[in-house]
Amino acid sequence: MKRLIDILGALVGLVVFAPLFLLIYILIKTTDPGPAIFKQKRMGKNGNTFYIYKFRTMVQNAEEMLRNDPILYREYQQNNYTLPLHRDPRISKTGCFLRKTSLDELPQLFNVLLGEMSLVGPRPVIEEEAEHYGDNKKIFFSVRPGMTGYWQVSGRDRVGYPQRVKVELDYIAKQNLWFDLKIILKTIRLLLQEER
């Protein structure tokens, strides 16, 4: 049932947001050279790797820029593998808007359709982050990662490791369709609040 809801939700989302996809694509291509879609290797169900898709929010050679600055990279690691928007020199002006509104996440509807992700689930991690789950890796990788999830509606970047591990494992233990629906509704509410 969850997979059926994922397929239907992704299909409806892709149709409804098609004009927005086109608008964002044009906006990125006209304001910053390079591809409009960014892909990054993440770990999903059973620890299998896949490419997650997002609208590109960073300048070209962003990862190289980050790794070449030891102080910035250390801050990135210590801050739950993110940087505050005002401290992140890699983010383009268009990218800043896309991240604030979470519109950069829309291409993950394709990941959901392909069965690599779910609409709701733990956030997919990079290999480096997976180490935080230690002996709980098998449990963490027992479900498909999600576009949104319990961690995102529980504080997102403000909830760092090891608390994030607890939140994600708590979702896996309690997951059901009703819980997923509550997370989706809370995600929508939080996005609307952010836009204000």
Image (cartoon, helix red, strand yellow):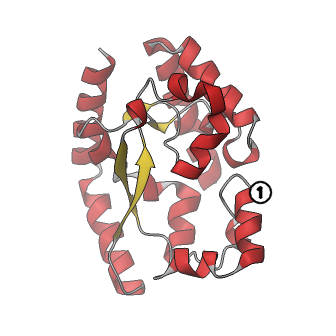
The amino acid marked with disc number 1 is Gln
User: Can see residue 51?
Assistant: yes
The local secondary structure at tag 1 comes to helix
Q: Residue furthest front?
A: 135
- Where residue 140 sits in the image (x, y, percent)? 53, 28
Horizontal placement of 68 versus 127: left or right?
Answer: right
> Is 150 or 129 nearer to us in this picture?
129
Residue 22: image quadrant is: bottom left
Horizontal placement of 135 versus 26: left or right?
Answer: right
> Is 148 or 172 nearer to us in this picture?
172
Residue in the picture at 30% in, 76% down = 26
Residue in the picture at 37% in, 45% down = 49
> Is 103 or 6 nearer to us in this picture?
6
Against 112, is 4 above or below? above
Write down the residue under mark 1: 78
Against 187, is 140 above or below? above
Horizontal placement of 126 versus 161: left or right?
Answer: left
For the N terminus, which image quadrant? Answer: top left
User: Can see residue 119?
Assistant: no
- Where residue 11 sits in the image (x, y, percent)? 22, 38
